Image (cartoon, rainbow, N blue to C red):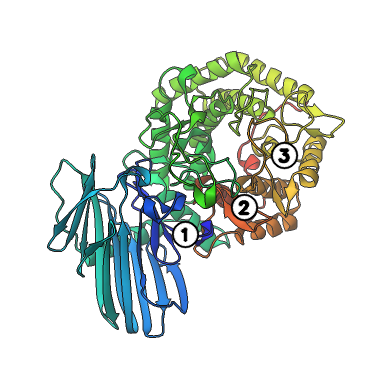
Amino acid sequence: MPIEDYGFLSDTETAALVSRDGSIDWLCMPRFDSGAFFARLLGTEENGYWKISPKGEVIKSSRRYRGDTLILDTEFETIGGCVRLTDCMPLRDDYPDVVRTVVGVRGSVEMEMTLVLRFDYGRLIPWVQRLDDGIIAMAGADAVVVRSDVPLHGEDLSTVARFTVHEGESKAFVLTWYPSHKPPPAAENSVESLRRTEEFWTEWASHARPGTEWRDAVLRSLLVLKGLTYAPTGGIIAAPTTSLPEEIGGTRNWDYRYCWLRDATFTLYSLLGAGYMEEAKAWRSWLLRAVAGSPSQIQTLYGAAGERCPIEYELSYLAGYAGSQPVRVGNAASLQFQLDVYGEVIDVMHQARRLGMKLDPAAWSLERTLVKFVAEHWQEADMGIWEVRGPPRHFTHSKVLAWVAMDRAVQACEKFHLSGDAAEWRRVRDRIHSEICSRAFNSKVGSFVQSFDSDKLDASLLMIPLVGFLPASDPRVQSTIAAIEKNLMHGGFVLRYHTDTDVDGLPSGEGAFLPCSFWFVDCLNLSGRYAQAREMFERLLSLRNDLGLLSEEYDPRTRQLVGNFPQAFSHVALLNSASNLGKHHGPAKDRSTCTPKK
């Protein structure tokens, strides 16, 4: 099943992926980063799935989200009639649920349900006990109760049901996870659960301020961000999946079910720009809790509750999506030194101040500590924004974000009258700026380059004007944009860098990382090339699937979405570009700075 054929459900604590043919092929409970018990997405049917569909031939199918919600309606047309499958994940009271309802739209349709539960990422076959209205399945610490309006029975280590739905009839199935040492929870009222879920999402969406002509794309992206939010803490995960490959058959398969600090600035900016102050406050609070402590111990990513990311390991028994191995759990990038992260954290605090969010003294104290760390360590090599697994380098983007850290600290003193050593921070800021301009601009290439004294290009250089390091009108910025357009543009979209170099220590091959193309849109816009920016933005919008969802990357060769799905960073970049195009200027105009032009 192509990645774009999946829909996304969420209860704002975990998520499910539902295929176009009515199969839930990925579901982790109780949290985004818990073990999956439907893992067919990364393996085979034996690794768990839950399919409800017509028994006979489907002549036609269609699907859509119900209004401004994450309730998914899928209609199946058969010779005998038409049925609608409605899938949702109600916001939980105690334990997470999936509610699936089959409604007869026209005629009579014979239906079939197949449920294969395999706990611990598709590995453990559970013990199953029958109930009057369903089953209980448990293995280890996990238990699931499935209740149904139709009789269920066992076949070949799976649970099945066969039933007929007539026009006007409905049949409901409710799956609930709970800890195996607890008694099973009481049955949910499926009709009431669906009503409450629709009411929640509709009410939440009603507060949005899309503010552009691309209202549907913007609102769907905001709903995705809300769906990727871990409600108890306010953390926003990068994606609900692990190991969907950046190239089909490749090895660049990572676990994205965690919260990246790097995403903080643009996420906060997007939420505030759309009118969601409470979500922005919750995200900022999560950020402050996560990074509290010694600056030297800050990680690049954290669990949804702010905990340290687990050690990366591989699930060798899973075949991988379309044979793409390995399948990974955890992310070793959490242990890397990535200098740019400190600039991102300090910038998010700066943006919060600028946009009217009051920070308490403890937050400024933390920020000063981070600034001091950057001032002392900015000259060190790191693993960079792309979290390379090769040797550390003096990545230009990392140095630019170190400059951002010092620049925002200076602005905190000068514009917001906070206490700090503005003179020293200004001195360090100007020194970093001078170093970047002298060592990161290659006159032979006619561009800024990926790392000091190199000749390689990198799409992260597009951030130079977006964070206010240099204006877009600067000849060096213009020549960098031109070099990226000439050398990193593939099939109309921007690659991160050429992976056939030795920079990242990995086998070559990946799609176009979608945020890079949105950054290019912003740079075109800042450069006064508004028509071209708009055309490229529309081209990027066309990559969304029929439900308005984007993955991490797009492969221009196969014309498929690749990488983890749906991807928060892609939707955040979409939101920011839509906002920037609507205002005819880019984010750098909102990030006023006192940059010395050297």
Quick one: 540 or 456, which is closer to the camera?
A: 456
At horizontal 46% and vertical 73% (from top left) the residue drawn is 62
Q: The disc labelled 1 sits on which kind of residue?
A: Tyr
Q: Amino acid at mark 3?
A: His
Question: In terms of sequence position, does the residue under pointer 2 or pointer 1 come before the other?
Answer: 1
Per the model, the C-alpha gap separating discs 3 and 1 is: 29 Å
Q: Position of residue 230 (x, y in %)?
A: 36, 43
Q: Are marks 2 and 3 in contact (CB under 8 Å)?
A: no
Looking at marks 2 and 3 on the same chain, the residue that comes earlier in the sequence is marked by 3
Residue 118, x across and y down, in percent = 32, 49
Give the residue drawn at x 21%, y 70%.
Answer: 150
Callout 3: 10 Å neighbours few (<14), some, many (20+)?
A: some
In the rendered image, residue 134, in percent from the top left (x then y), is placed at 18, 61
According to the picture, the residue beneath numbered tag 2 turns out to be 554
Q: Mark 2: few, some, or many residues within 10 Å (few <14, many ≥20)?
A: many
* Residue occupying the far right of the picture: 444
Instruction: Return the residue at label 1.
Output: 6
